[in-house]
């Protein structure tokens, strides 16, 4: 069974700290991987998409990496801000299947 | 572009009533996904369409749930009859099927069945 695991489930850090969120997956036939952000009571916002042929993607203070051989992706957030507080989810699809396999998310709190 | 549009945003109904959720995907996108999110189970894919055709409905929990996509710009998810355990947030997402399959989500419909 394909699985996606996100560790830690919850994280609390002081403002300004650099942090790393982890996502591991069991499917070696990954096609691409997406990181999403979800604010409480809101929908999901796509942050970054990494294709299987890529190693990383960057957007502003966010950097996502992908290591297919180890089945891992990380989301690095630089100089965290209280506005970064949200739940971060990773998901991937396998082969050219449009269906995403989801992790349960990491709930991040950045304290001022 | 307005993004994925869902209606209603909130729905409160009584057990046994029919519920219809609506979704308008991003113009030009040809894949549409219905998800359900609960605290206990996280995000679950219910069904997805490609070019208006249902491709995978293995996540639809039971016959009380049905989904249609009569055209490229509209889809419905219907629950009949509704039960309290159907209470959840239902999301619609769409993607452009050009290899990357990046999904874009609507704001969701929060359903409460009393």
Image: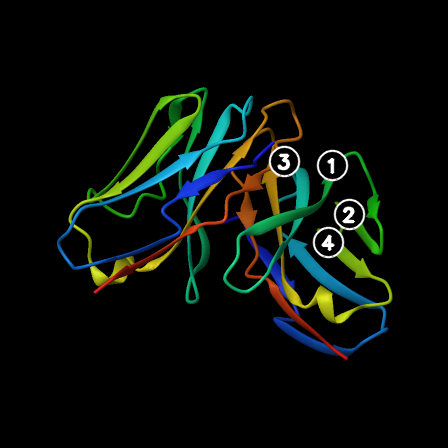
Local crowd size for mark 2, using a 10 Å CA cut-off: few (<14), some (14–19), many (≥20): many
The residue that mark 2 highlights is: A66
CA–CA distance in space, label 3 to label 4: 19 Å
Which one is in front, A23 or B49?
Answer: B49
Q: Residue at x 68, y 58 (%)?
A: A23
CA–CA distance in space, label 2 to label 1: 8 Å
Q: Nearer the viewer, mark 3 or mark 1?
A: 3
Most extreme residue toward the left, as rendered?
B16
Q: Position of residue A109 (x, y in %)?
A: 68, 74
Local crowd size for mark 1, using a 10 Å CA cut-off: few (<14), some (14–19), many (≥20): many
Q: Nearer the viewer, mark 3 or mark 4?
A: 3
Q: Circles 2 and 1: CB distance less than 8 Å?
A: yes
Disc 3 chain ID:
B
Q: Circles 2 and 4: CB distance less than 8 Å?
A: yes
Disc 2 chain ID:
A
Q: Position of residue B108 (x, y in %)?
A: 45, 50
Mark 1 or 4 closer to N-term? Answer: 1
Q: Is residue B90 visible?
A: yes
The residue that mark 3 highlights is: B102
CA–CA distance in space, label 3 to label 1: 13 Å
- Residue B84 lies left or right of residue A95; in this view the side is left
The residue that mark 1 highlights is: A52
């Amino acid at each position: 069974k394909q699985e996606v695991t996100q560790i830690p489930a919850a994280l609390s850090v002081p403002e300004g700290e650099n942090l790393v969120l982890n996502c591991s997956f069991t499917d070696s036939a990954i096609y691409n991987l997406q990181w999403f952000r979800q604010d409480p009571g809101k929908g999901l916002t796509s942050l970054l998409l990494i294709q299987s042929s890529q190693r990383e993607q960057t957007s502003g203070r966010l950097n996502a990496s992908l290591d297919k051989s180890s089945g891992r992706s990380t989301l690095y957030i630089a100089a965290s801000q209280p506005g970064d507080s949200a739940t971060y989810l990773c998901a991937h699809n396998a082969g050219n299947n449009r269906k995403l396999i989801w992790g349960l998310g990491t709930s991040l709190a950045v304290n001022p | 572009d307005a993004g994925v549009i869902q209606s209603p945003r909130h729905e409160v109904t009584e057990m046994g009533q029919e519920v219809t959720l609506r979704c308008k995907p991003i113009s030009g996108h040809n894949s549409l996904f219905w998800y359900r999110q609960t605290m206990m189970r996280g995000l679950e894919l219910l069904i997805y369409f490609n070019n208006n055709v249902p491709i995978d409905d293995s996540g639809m929990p039971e016959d009380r749930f049905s989904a249609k996509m009569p055209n490229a710009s509209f889809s419905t998810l219907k629950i009949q009859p509704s039960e309290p355990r159907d209470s959840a947030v239902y999301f619609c997402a769409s993607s452009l099927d050009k290899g990357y399959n990046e999904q874009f989500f609507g704001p969701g419909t929060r359903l409460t069945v009393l």
